Amino acid sequence: MRRRQALPYLEDPDLSVLDIALLLSYSDAAAFARAFKAATGGAVSAHRRQSQLRRQGEAAR
């Protein structure tokens, strides 16, 4: 899994999961999501939600 490459992409709200999957040479979003979960133990959606909450918290400071 191309975790190091995936994490910055996941923090970009303008990129869809499919966009990220294709950027990382996965055949589709589902393949990327499976690989991400296998590598991290968490879902792509959960990571994106955490990133969004972190950004909102930083913006409020």
Image: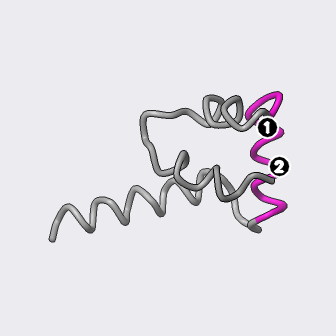
Mark 1 crowdedness (10 Å alpha carbons): few <14, some 14-19, many ≥20: few
Q: Is residue 31 above or below residue 6?
A: above
| Amino acid, disc 2 | Arg
Q: Residue furthest bottom?
A: 61
Measuring 43% from the left and 41% from the top, which residue is drawn there?
13
Q: Nearer the viewer, residue 34 or 2?
A: 2
Q: Is residue 29 above or below residue 12?
A: above
Q: Main secondary structure of the magenta part?
A: helix
| Cα distance in 3D space between marks 2 and 1 | 6 Å
Q: Is residue 39 above or below residue 35?
A: below
Query: Residue 43, how many percent across, how many down?
Result: 69, 57
Q: Kindly check if marks 2 and 1 are in contact, taking CB atoms under 8 A apart as contact.
A: yes
Give SS at disc 2: helix
Q: Magenta segment range? A: 26-39
Find residue 28 and report its image quarter: top right
Q: Which mark is residue 40?
A: none
Query: Residue 4, how many percent across, how many down?
Result: 65, 58
The residue tagged 1 is: 30
Find residue 51 and report its image quarter: bottom left
> Is residue 24 shown left or right of residue 10?
right
Q: Nearer the viewer, residue 26 or 59?
A: 26
| Amino acid, disc 1 | Ala
Measuring 37% from the left and 62% from the top, which residue is drawn there?
53
> Is residue 40 shown left or right of residue 15?
right
Residue 27 on the magenta span: yes
The residue tagged 2 is: 34
Measuring 81% from the left and 53% from the top, which residue is drawn there?
1
